[in-house]
Amino acid sequence: MTRHGVEAEIAELTVDLPIHLSRAGDVARLLRLFADDRWLRRGSSESRRWVDYGRDLALAWDALEENLHDRPGAVVDCVRLAVIRSTLTTVEDFPASVITAAVRTGYWTPERSLSTIDRLSRPAERAVCCHYLLASADLDVHGRRPVESRLIQLASLPADELPARTLLSGLHLMSSAGREAVAIAIQETARVVEWQMPDEMAPPELRHEDVVAADAVEILIGVPEAHTSRLVERIGDTLLRALTELAAGRDNDAVPRLGSLAIDMPSYVVRRLLDRGPRLARTHQALTAFAELIPSCPDPAGFRRRLEAALAAVPESTLSSDTGEAPTLTSTISPASRFPAAIAEATSDDKQVFDEFTRRTAGPAVLASLLTVQDLSPEDIGAIIEVLFRPDDVVGQFVMLQTIAQSINQPNVVAAVQTVKAQLLCQAIDHAFRTGTLSVLWESIPPGLYADADLQRVLDLALALPAEEQRSAYWHTVNQRGLPPLTANVPRLAALFGIMPVLTTAQVGQAFDNLRGIPDAAVRRLAMAMLGPFLSREQVHAAMADLGTISEARELAWAYSVLDAPPAWAAAASAEITDGTSLAEIVKLRPDLDVVAPLRRMDHNNRLDALWAIALDGDSPLPPEVTPEILDLPAESERSSYSWRAMALAAAARRVSDDWLPAAWVAASNLPRRLRIDDAALMGYHWSYEYPQAAVVQELAPRLTGPLTRRAFEAVRDLPWLPREDTFATLAKTADAALAGDIADAALAGYHRLRELPDGNEVAWDGTVIPILDERFRSEREARLAELIAALADRLDPERLLAARRLALDFRNVGPRAWLPARLMPHLDPADRRELLAPALVGALVFVADEVERLDLVADLIPFVREELDRSTGEVLEFVFRRFPEHGPGFLLDEAELAALDQDDHDVPRQVFRLMAPGGRKGLQQGQSRLGGSGRVRAVTCVSPDPPARACLRVRNASRRSRGAVTVRSGRGLL
């Protein structure tokens, strides 16, 4: 074996050395690994694992923290590790476009940029940076060679690290030899798939570097050097297999089940991404184009035969034009550009078509004509444009203005058109911001239509828009937590994105100065990435310096916190931190740190992230300076899709001190009742995302007393069933008699409204929509109502107790009808129990027939059955002992006693026994009638005697008792 091979093998054998040293408690040897850069540079360059190095560094930090007070020289070690962490994370903060701009402007040499790229931990990020250098850095042949060499090295990584998709997407930027080398390297190791969710929609764990076969066909057609036989064969086989499977499937127009990987997307988007139709059409199109690649297959004739057979087996009806587009993010949620249609209408020879187009779009053009003869202030022009603006025809309005400027090529007309274009673009941006469509605005308006406009007013408007990520309440769901912000989600950046290429140098400088002042470091990094291609050398220098301080401040504050440095040191370092989660982590280490100053320098999102994390950490009352910061958060976003205050206050409700509780209630009362987001029930999410005020009331309710409890009830009584049921259940635990009665009345009123609704899909009820109103849904509501009434029973007045008794008899489901009476019996007068007892006992016995383990339902009723039996048999015993004083125990007569009875004596026991059943014959008939003619129960819901949070529903098909049992928490979620 060569020396190089021995060194590589040793490097692989020692890769887990820090783990072994950490487990052995050998802190000194573990820290010596980081005394210089030898541990970082172990092995060959191809085998370096930056992620592993970061892991090793974390082990050293943990070991040092555990032995901080016992180890001499710990301060030096701690600072060294902090500097290493700062260096690594600072590298991650440099966007690819800024690294390229540093080379393009001469601020960095290509060698320095490559050294920085080599320290990036993610292979895909390294590949992207190399592609940026090849595309934009103006490198000569000698400068390009080391860049391509690194891409070829990346192509040799194992399959689980290989950035195959990224490498393929940039093949066209490489030399002919480089293209072929990459293609050969990945032809066996790249994972080739038929479909993947776009990165814009995939949660972090689903972000992928798999090669999507249909996309690869388009790339390979344009790069002949990549036509390696094995890669082409694998792509073709994947497409043929997908076509065969999709053609054999069946159309399914149903909305995919909630809870799928695409749960965050509207149903029509899910269909476009997942359903058979679009995927089949996309695969068919890719295979049709694949014909150009067939000569590169190992067996061209054989593959062509298979291809022709597969294409012939696909019915034409499945390939209609409306499903023929690729199922990508752009084709599903981006509005199709109306530019071609607008051009067609503007140049149509059909007078009727042209006149209709003119009627819809000519308003701004008329205004431009007016400006040639009359001066108007910008404010007046803006007000007129606001009236003339048509969102659906804005492209046509730009086309009409462009037509006027080209037809009448006079300076005053052109100037007027440019002024109107600027105002029209401002109106379009403002409308897109208010409707949440800024991210797709520039896809619908071609830049050529506004490039000649006076963009200063547009730039000023864009720079005044919010510079923080526009969150929806669903941002906090599992699929969206942890995702970094996207340019499309930051209004200021999204608005600038379309006009950056046409701004002047001075205007780029204005944008740069503005964006450098954004508080959020993550958003600032996005801004610098967007500005990268337009920056000058001086601006690149400023951007690099600014991005480098982000991690330095975070790591220095962390080091000071671990070292128990003086508070002033930690406070000074923390003052530069703009990331809320990082600040919360430092506060956990240094509870004495003054957090108010750094909090107030953050934007709303990061302030919430910090306060939310602080509130969730611990059980003691919040520090007095933290609660006011929570209450001061904005109650609602501009688009009414998010509430910072609700998120933080719900997390802090159990820790708000008693002194601050009234103020917390006032802050909660000013929250929006409902956010303008997709229906939570239809989306499969918890209701608290949609109803922020009720969510906070639900968390505060256990601590509320007196008038505040009444106000909490009033805040939720008119809400839909999900927030109403949960909050009523919480309030029921502490409600006084008056409030208990009002809660019962409101719950019963909602139940009776539900009884009047017919079954169906998406049925409107109490201000929202029931996804599926069927027997199961009704059973769930009956179970929740039974739990609520049982919790309130000890405080209900006699009239409401009688209403509760009637409710138990009215339930369609045997479970609540069997369970609730036993909770009502102790509070009812003996005379009022009799009518309820027989139906309850029959229901319990019916349920136990299928669920033997629920004998508690019968056992709970036994004391009341015994009480009723004692009362009923009393009259019989009185008759027996009056007639036969010497009779023994019981009331059964022997033959002699029976012979001694006359006819009148026989009539007496008949009359008595007829009354023994509670409610007489009518009570028995009521109990039996609930079973239906067949004696089977179609839907049985059992409410457990346990607390409501552990109650369960059991719904089964009566005709197949042994199958299909499903258990879910009572009223806590959809089945």
Image (cartoon, rainbow, N blue to C red):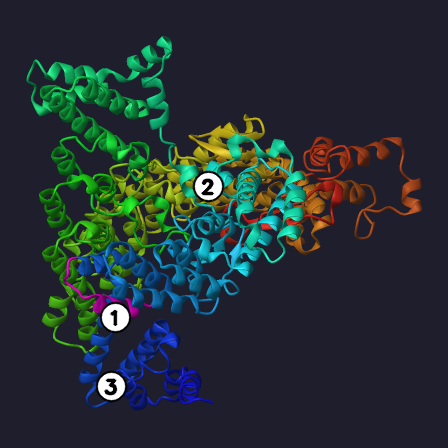
> Of residues 371 and 953, which is closer to you in this image?
371
> Of residues 22 and 297, which is closer to you in this image?
297
- The amino acid pointed to by label 2 is Met
Q: How busy is the neighbourhood of tag 3: few (under 14 within 10 Å), some, or many (20 plus)?
A: few
Quarter-of-image position of residue 806: top right
> Of residues 92 and 898, which is closer to you in this image?
92
Report the Cα–Cα distance between label 2 and label 3.
53 Å
Q: Write down the region rendered in magenta.
A: 105-121
Q: Is residue 796 visible to the viewer in this orientation of the structure? A: no
Tell me the mark number nearer the camera, choosing from 3 and 1.
1
Q: Looking at the image, is mark 3 or mark 1 earlier in the sequence?
A: 3
Q: Looking at the image, is mark 1 or mark 2 earlier in the sequence?
A: 1
Q: What is the x, y in percent for residue 268?
A: 48, 36
As drawn, the residue found furthest toward the top would be: 351
Q: How busy is the neighbourhood of tag 2: few (under 14 within 10 Å), some, or many (20 plus)?
A: some
The disc at residue 115 is 1
Quarter-of-image position of residue 595: bottom left
Report the Cα–Cα distance between label 1 and label 2.
47 Å
Count of residue discs: 3
The secondary structure type at the circle numbered 1 is helix
Per the image, the residue denoted by label 3 is: 35
The secondary structure type at the circle numbered 3 is loop
- The amino acid pointed to by label 1 is Ser
- The amino acid pointed to by label 3 is Ala
Is residue 223 placed above or below 444 in the rendered structure? below
The disc at residue 683 is 2
**Horizontally, is 480 left or right of 285 in the view?**
left
Residue 819 highlighted magenta (yes or no): no
- Work out which quarter of the rendered image holds the C terminus and state it: top right
Is residue 505 placed above or below 904 in the rendered structure? below
Q: What is the x, y in percent for residue 493?
A: 23, 44
Q: What is the x, y in percent for residue 107?
A: 14, 62
